[in-house]
Amino acid sequence: MAAGAVGDTPWPASGHIFTIFFHPPEQSFEAVDADLPNISGSQHREEQAVKRFNLPGIGRFSAVTFGPGAAPAVGAAADGTRPASEKVPAVKRIAELLLPEDILLDMEVPGKSQLIDEIGGHMQRVHALARESVALSLSHREQIGSTGLGEGVAIPHARVKGLDRVQVAYLRLKPPIPFDSPDGKPVSHVLVLLVPKQATEQHLAILAEAAQLLSDRRFRERLHLCKHPLEVKRLFEGGPDGRAH
Amino acid sequence: MNSALYFGVSSNNDTLEIATLEPGRAAVAIEFPANAMGVEAIKLFLADCAVPVRLAVAGAAALSLALALGDAPRREVFIVSSSVTSQPVALAHYARRAI
């Protein structure tokens, strides 16, 4: 990518990442680069930029990111156009995080608070986490709003200070318990999620995968039929269709 | 709003793609199912955010998504025309820069 100029400000040389934000209503744009002060320009200069980088119709987009060795990508695509200093963290799937000893089938608890106590006790027995700290964190989160998702599913979760890895547990309740879910249905599938303070992306990815799997009626039905923790783990590995997803 | 979190959400018929902008981290889009449970799962995540949240949403269900996700304190939602962009990372940048 050749270096250029907007007014007196040089375009970043080859190898730089920079982003141009277009503002069609104002017919103006800004170019942002880590190594340069923000610069702005008029429609005329935008047209120059479009011409320079051969991006037809670019004025209709709000952001364009240019990266080293890559064709200009519209909309700051997440491929090769991010600064080398930014690392994409490895995101683990539920099946990788869910250990057989963290799968408890047909647990009997009278209500949500007792469930949270049981989760705290389990995390202490199996993972040497402080029972009260886990229970308190989960309880605080439930006070913000129920973690029930509907369709008999809940994901009690909390960020736990000092945790060095994500902890996942699956509990199947028998009978289902009230959970203040959005659809009012009692909950029988409980996916517990304890995440370190700085695990935003992993947290989001697990919620996304859980929603993908557990919103499938067939998957929930198959979960109900599992007789052994390993069957549950295999089900999470295979997804709703029994295939790796 | 320097300590805010910025999200871009793009909806289509099958998926809700969400991207997060965090200081010093690459923005990566993650797919949720475009159904009630997918929306509830995103709401769960947003409810965990201890800082103000700003979202830009675009796509098929942008209006209903904006209403569902924006109904909370310290939260701003921008609805963006798909003709501007429908890519979640670009939407997250939009959320960061919108005034």
Image: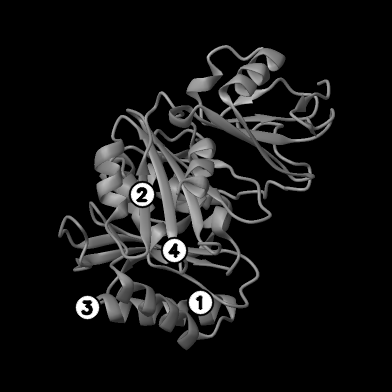
Based on the displayed image, in which of its 4 quarters is residue B9 positioned? top left
Q: Which mark is residue A192?
A: none
Alpha carbon separation for disc pair 4 and 1: 31 Å
Which residue is found at the position 27% from the left and 75% from the top?
A112
Alpha carbon separation for disc pair 2 and 4: 11 Å
Task: Name the amino acid type tagged 4.
Answer: Pro
Residue A90's x, y, as percent? 66, 48
Residue A151's x, y, as percent? 23, 51
Residue at label 1? Answer: A123
For disc 1, the chain is A
Residue at label 2? Answer: B77
In the image, A87: left or right of B23? Answer: right
Answer yes or no: do the residues labelled 3 and 4 have beta carbons within 8 Å? Answer: no
Answer yes or no: do the residues labelled 2 and 4 have beta carbons within 8 Å? Answer: no
Residue at label 3? Answer: A110
Disc on the earlier residue, 2 or 4: 4
